[in-house]
Amino acid sequence: MQTKIYGHRGAMGEYPENTMLAFKKAIAAGVDGLEIDVHLSRDGEVVVIHDEYVNRTTDGYGAVKDMDLRALKLLSAGSEFEALDNYDPTTWTSEQIPTLDEVLNLVEYYGIELNIELKTNVFEYEGIEQRVHEIVADHNYLDKVIYSSFHMPSILRMKAIYPEARIAWLTDKVPLWPIDHMEELALEALHISYKAILRYPGRISGIEDRIRVWTVNETTDARKLIDHGVETLMTNYPERMMAISRTHQK
Ligand code: G3P
Ligand code: MG
């Protein structure tokens, strides 16, 4: 089995996270999928941003849940990105907070997978699971979407809405008896911090092909994780990881 590569928040090591620019750059690097984070705006739109607040990644202030999509769209999601060698603020400032619908339009064009992480562990976004699922269903993209969350109630709600959904539990530890968790909750996979896997590789023995790891940015770690046979590496540096993936497979 070839370990897949997903662009984490697109390609956040080199481009403003969770922007269409970062997603396009990751796709250009050849990734198998994207990982994105979603919240609900005040008017119930599913928007793609990591934090509950817009402060860190945009030029605005406030909670996503307190702003309508129209207000969120006026913010720059590119202007706050730290300067890099290839930093070009004149073009990046125009990056907006994407909607889930916009990201689905992009990934379906290229036919790649999409991991939608529901950021439901701080604020309760009533109905977010239903809303997210409706949008994915409208795009007829259920087969290539994986829902994930650190928040177990969100996972259970998603399962209740759509039992066949591909769902992963996000955790920074390798649980004891991971297969028991997956079977009992009918999960497709576990999304586990790569550090935990490197520490306890024996715990995923036999279920490596149902383990996706985040967030792998160093090539030495990537090689070890590929040798352990994990299904997917999520990375902030898609180009770097695609180069490893092309030359190093189990
Ligand atoms: O989905 C993997 C990873 O994104 C979880 O952590 O904080 O980067 O969303 P975070
Ligand atoms: Mg995430």
Image: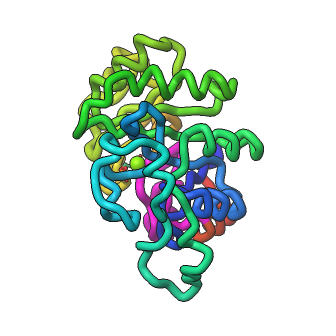
Q: How is the image coloured?
A: rainbow
Q: Nearer the viewer, residue 107 or 51?
A: 51
Q: Is residue 164 above or below residue 66?
A: above
Q: Residue at x 53, y 15 (%)?
A: 164
Q: Is residue 220 magenta?
A: yes
Q: Residue at x 30, y 60 (%)?
A: 61
Q: Residue at x 68, y 28 (%)?
A: 139
Q: Is residue 159 above or below residue 44?
A: above
Quarter of the image with the N terminus is top right
> x%, y% of residue 16?
49, 67
Instruction: Give the quadrant of residue 92.
Output: bottom right
Instruction: Give the quadrant of residue 22.
Output: bottom right
> x%, y% of residue 145?
58, 32
Q: Nearer the viewer, residue 73 or 88?
A: 73
**Whether residue 150 is visible:** yes
**Whether residue 227 is visible:** no
Q: From the viewer's perspective, is 95 left or right of 71?
A: right
Q: Nearer the viewer, residue 75 or 49?
A: 75
Q: From the viewer's perspective, is 89 left or right of 129?
A: right
> x%, y% of residue 30?
70, 58
Q: Is residue 189 magenta?
A: no
Q: From the viewer's perspective, is 83 left or right of 249?
A: left
Magenta span of residues = 213-238
The residue positioned farthest toward the right in the image shown: 109
Q: Residue at x 42, y 16 (%)?
A: 159
> x%, y% of residue 177?
28, 28
Q: From the viewer's perspective, is 58 left or right of 144?
A: left
